[in-house]
Amino acid sequence: MKGKVLIVCAPSGTGKSTIIQYLREQGVQFGFSISATTRAPRGEEHDGVEYFFLTEEEFQKKIDEDAFIEWEQVYAGQKYGTLKEQVEGQLSEGHNIVFDVDVNGGLRIKDYFKDRALALFILPPSIEALRERLEKRGTETPEKIQKRLDRAEYEISRAPEFDRQIVNDDLATAEAQALEIVSEFLR
C-alpha cells in the first residue's frame, strides 16, 4: 500500500507549522518531506535532517537530471526543491508524507501526485492581522516583514487553486478543521 501526500501551504506567520504540529499531536501519522536547498544552514540545522544542503552546482545537476518533483528559486540566491527519490521511497513503504512548501511548489506537487495528494491552504484573517503576527515575532526587520507581506498577497491569490482552505482566525477552530479534513482524506 502506498502512502498519501498532504501539502500544507500558507503565508509566513499564518500558523502553518503550529497546525501541522497539532495534527501530529492528535495522532495523525505522517513523515516529513525533506527539501533540498542552496541556502546555508541556520543555527543548529543539519544536512539530511531539516534540509539537504546543496551547492548551487549540485542543485543545478539535480535539475538537469530531472531529480526534482518541483523546485523554485524562492528568494534571490535561495533555491528549494523536492527530490523524487526521497519522497517515492517513503511513499512506497506506505508512509504518508506532509509537505510544508511554498504555493508554487505545493501546486506542482499536487499536479505530480494528483488524487494521492490533498492540497490545504491556511489563510490569515487579513493582511493586517498577518502584519501584526509577523511584527509580534520580533525576529525580522520592517523591510523583511514587508517582503513577506508582498509575497503573502501573491500566495493568497493562489489559495482558490488548492483542494481546501482554512482561515486561521481562531487557532483552535483552524486546528479542528484541519484535523477533520486531513483525517477524512487519510481514511
Image: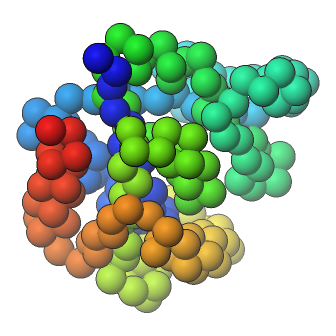
- Residue at the (41%, 14%) spot, across then down: 92
Q: Is residue 178 left or right of residue 60?
A: left
User: Against 174, is 70 above or below?
Assistant: above
Quarter of the image where the N terminus is located: top left
Task: Look at the image and name its color scheme.
Answer: rainbow
Camera-side residue of 119 and 34: 119
x, y percent for residue 71: 70, 41
x, y percent for residue 32: 40, 29
Residue 149 visible: no
In the rendered image, which quarter is residue 90 located in?
A: top left
Residue 53 visible: yes
Quarter of the image where the C terminus is located: top left
- Residue at the (75%, 33%) spot, across then down: 38
Q: Is residue 30 left or right of residue 157?
A: left
Q: Is residue 133 left or right of residue 107?
A: left
Q: Is residue 23 left or right of residue 128?
A: left
x, y percent for residue 156: 51, 76
User: Against 80, is 103 above or below?
Assistant: below
In the rendered image, which quarter is residue 3 located in?
A: top left
Camera-side residue of 39 and 107: 107
- Residue at the (83%, 46%) spot, across then down: 77
User: Against 19, is 173 above or below?
Assistant: below
x, y percent for residue 50: 50, 27
